[in-house]
Image (cartoon, helix red, strand yellow):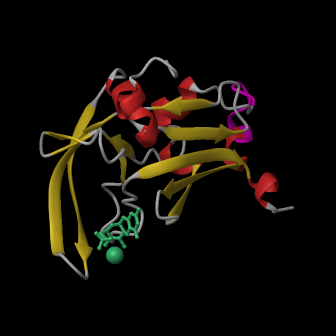
Amino acid sequence: MPGARAPGAAGTRLRLSGDLERAALLAVADLREMPQRTVEAGFACGRLGEQRHAYTGPLLLDVLLAAGPRFDPVIGKDRVRFLIAVTGRDGHTAVLSWAEIDPRYGGGVALLATRVDGRDMDADGPQLVVPGDTAGGRYVSRIAAIWTGPAAAAGAA
Ligand SMILES: Nc1nc2c(c(=O)[nH]1)N[C@H]1C(S)=C(S)[C@@H](COP(=O)(O)O)O[C@H]1N2
Ligand SMILES: [Mo]
């Protein structure tokens, strides 16, 4: 999956790292090869007013599972240690928990959008879309990096 893209796409690849079997550099085109979901979602934005768009992309959960998170797949509670941090090119970072998007726990939807209202985002990089959020803070645009790993790696006991 990583490494196959044209040189022009290199600048918009996101770095997927953390406690994973297969860390990856992913272009928007790589994300588009995964099963896509379209959701309508919106958030209140101080600067732009109410935003509402149709976002298309793979589930964040599927992207992370494809990278092989190193929790015990059999012991269901082992995964609740995991955090997910999504960072934009400008450094803006939003955190989710693994349980929040795992169907056995919160089951929330989170997408890595590759299209907004039908427009490809290859040049900008993907955007995190959390349809359950009514505020804009976690709709991280121009994603540069995603890290997932246990809370202990982030300094928690
Ligand atoms: N990369 C990045 N994405 C971001 C933000 C940001 O500062 N950086 N701000 C968030 C917030 S708070 C809102 S309301 C929306 C719209 O913010 P904007 O004014 O930066 O477009 O983008 C979200 N995504
Ligand atoms: Mo915002």
148 horizontally vs 109: left or right: right
Ligand 1 found in image quarter? bottom left
148 horizontally vs 55: left or right: right
Residue 69's quadrant in the figure?
A: top right
The x and y percentages for residue 19 are 73, 37
At horizontal 36% and vertical 43% (from top left) the residue drawn is: 111
Residue 72's quadrant in the figure?
A: top right
Q: Report the number of numbered marks.
A: 0
Choose between 21 and 152: the one closer to the eye: 21
Farthest right residue? Answer: 157
The x and y percentages for residue 64 are 55, 34
The x and y percentages for residue 49 are 16, 77
At horizontal 39% and vertical 46% (from top left) the residue drawn is: 110
- Is residue 75 shown in magenta? yes
Farthest front residue? Answer: 7
At horizontal 24% and vertical 74% (from top left) the residue drawn is: 44
Span of residues in magenta: 72-78
74 horizontally vs 37: left or right: right
Q: Quadrant of the C terminus?
A: bottom right
Residue 15's quadrant in the figure?
A: top right
At horizontal 64% and vertical 26% (from top left) the residue drawn is: 68
Choose between 122 and 76: the one closer to the eye: 122
The x and y percentages for residue 129 are 34, 52
- Is residue 42 shown in magenta? no
The image shows residue 7, relative to residue 144, as above or below, that is above
